[in-house]
Image (cartoon, rainbow, N blue to C red):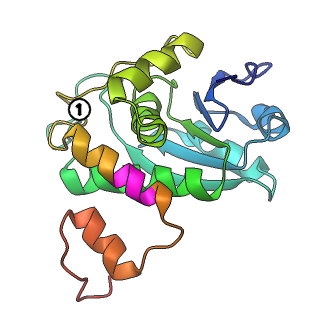
Amino acid sequence: MEVKPAFPSYDGHFVTPYLAVGACPRPEHVPEIAAAGIRGILNVVSCAGREAFEYIAHLPASIVWAHCGFWDGYFGPPEPSASQVLCPSFARLVIVRACEMLRDHPPLLIHCGGGSGRSGNVAAVVIAAREGISIDAAVARMQKTRKVIARFFRESLWKFTPDEELLGLARDTLAEREVPRAAWCARIRGDGRPDKTGV
């Protein structure tokens, strides 16, 4: 599988022809991201300063942007009320959102703060599901192009969501063009119950 060359100055890499992983872009990186053909950006930064979001104002209309952020503890121990373990429903939400973005707006850039842990972990699930390989094999494949990609955090971020569940959810989302709202909500909850509230 031939992968596109690295970006000229942006700290990001195409890890497959359809998916790039990188650090948080700055406004000056937007032209080279657009020139590389990126059509979707998923930002998984949870909480950060204004610099984590100021590039958005410079995006052209050809790039669709979405945010589904979560904490990874990189900046030190979390606050007492914060957890770096994703609850199952939020873990499912992150994977569904990433797969929807890849399905509808490829090639996709997934970025976090440094382009290693959060973005690499989400990308690993998406690639594994699309390529029919294990998550570990997806991580190893990405590390050939982007060496800073972290291993898959089964004991922390994804502790309560088994690989098989994440991969099945990703495969289903990539394969379906549209999912009715009730089925989408049931998918995030992790059950087959129809959504009675419409929320």
Could you tell whether 138 is left or right of 39 in the image? left
Quadrant containing the C terminus in the rendered view: bottom left
| Res 94 visible | no
Circle 1 Cα neighbour tier, 10 Å, few/some/many (<14 / 14–19 / ≥20):
few
Please name the amino acid that badge 1 sits on: Pro
Secondary structure mainly formed by the magenta segment: helix
| Res 102 visible | yes
Q: SS class of the residue under badge 1?
A: loop
Residue sitting at x 19%, y 44%? 161
Q: Where is residue 66 in the image (x, y as percent from the top left)?
A: 56, 55
Q: How many marks?
A: 1
Residue sitting at x 66%, y 54%? 105
Q: Position of residue 104 (x, y in %)?
A: 62, 59
Name the image quarter holding residue 150. Answer: top left
Residue sitting at x 19%, y 49%? 87
* Residue 187 lies in the magenta stretch: no
Q: Position of residue 152 (x, y in %)?
A: 31, 25
Using the image as rendered, state which of residue 36 and residue 136 is in the foreground. 136
Could you tell whether 103 is left or right of 79 in the image? right
Q: Position of residue 20 (x, y in %)?
A: 62, 32
Give the residues in magenta.
169-173
Residue sitting at x 48%, y 50%? 98
Could you tell whether 93 is left or right of 83 in the image? right
Name the image quarter holding residue 154. Answer: top left
Query: For mark 1, what is the residue?
Result: 78
Name the image quarter holding residue 82. Answer: top left
Q: In this view, does 166 lie above or below 150?
A: below
Q: Is residue 83 above or below residue 8?
A: below
* Residue 172 lies in the magenta stretch: yes
Q: Is residue 140 above or below residue 77?
A: above
Quadrant containing the N terminus in the rendered view: top right
